[in-house]
Amino acid sequence: MDRQGSLTALRRAVLEFERAHDVGPDSWCVALSGGADSLALTAVAAALRPTTALIVDHRLQPGSAEVAAEARERALGFGCVDARVVEVTVGTAGGPEAAARTARYAALDDARRGAVVLLAHTLDDQAETVLLGLGRGSGPRSLAGMRAYDAPWGRPLLGIRREATHAACAELGVAPWQDPHNADPRYTRARLRAEVLPLLEEVLGGGVAAALARTAAALREDTDTLDDQAGHLRADIVEDGTLETARLAGLPASIRRRVIRGWLLDGGATGLTDKHIRGVDVLITDWRGQGGVAVSSPLRGQRMFAERRDGELVLRREPV
């Protein structure tokens, strides 16, 4: 794509996203880091409707406050109606990347004031997400990647290559911030970006990132269909918060595990993995009187267990 066409392509992508999804008639927010992807998205979004830039300062690097302040000034220069810097404290749960992501999303959710938040994930980010899910064996839901719209989060650039956002910044005459974490080999995603994807492109003759994104889209369609079927079944099978194991046992595995997942989420479980769901599934398919399966609970100081009692699956909580 030539440089002069990059902003036009990004604007078209955001307009198509706006037409395809119910994001409300008024304003929206953009998550702005100061990097090329979010700078280009902010410039385009601000030209289409009243836009508030939300800049999360993770305070993980020296000079992060200055980077955030510069991003704020650029957002206002692009025509944003407001630009706010939100400082966060990053924990340690799940490792540095996951902890930063958790803190960032929580801060954005608190600051958005009911508006949709546009995120500048590109097709390249989608490809990296699919590879991460593949390497972790976390099932089709992870391989399905990121959704274009998962309220309140909107990702209008999932069909845009990263090179186009850099070209758009050149067209705008701005030099994006280069996050040193993106080139730090201690971070898994950074190594995927710098080493794995380029190698795959070389070995397979190019087009790998786009192919991975297409794979995610196809899996997401299948997953949505199966989730819908499982949701209707769950409404019939769940009674007083319990699941009848006899009715579950006869279901296809892909549907049964989705019923289990929905039941766990309805019961307050968080951070579910494929391993959690398969562990609970064993209580139905290979019942030998074993104990319950621990699943994540949102309540500090408590653990949640899925157990089998008298032919039913029940949820139990106990203090840590």
Image: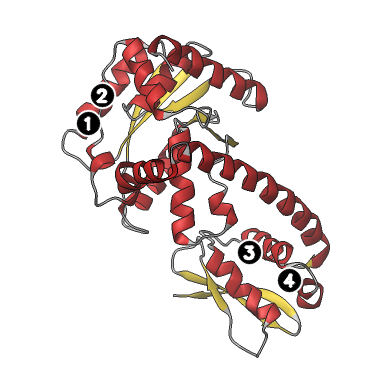
Q: Secondary structure at mark 1?
A: helix
Q: Secondary structure at mark 4?
A: strand
Q: Residue at x 68, y 75 (%)?
A: 314
Mark 3 residue crowding within 10 angstroms, few (<14) / some (14–19) / many (20+): many
Residue tagged 3: 264
Mark 2 is on which residue type?
Ala
Mark 4 residue crowding within 10 angstroms, few (<14) / some (14–19) / many (20+): some
The answer to which image quadrant residue 313 occupies is bottom right
Real-space Cα separation, disc 1 to disc 3, in angstroms: 40 Å
Mark 3 is on which residue type?
Leu
Which callout, 3 or 2, points at the residue further toward the start of the chain? 2
Q: Secondary structure at mark 2?
A: helix
Residue tagged 2: 69
Circle on res. 242: 4
Question: How many discs appear?
Answer: 4
Real-space Cα separation, disc 3 to disc 2, in angstroms: 42 Å
Is 257 placed above or below 202 here? below
Q: Are marks 1 and 3 in contact (CB under 8 Å)?
A: no
Residue tagged 1: 65
Q: Residue at x 46, y 15 (%)?
A: 44
Q: Are marks 2 and 1 in contact (CB under 8 Å)?
A: yes
Q: Residue at x 60, y 24 (%)?
A: 17
Give the percent coordinates (x, y) of residue 144: 57, 48
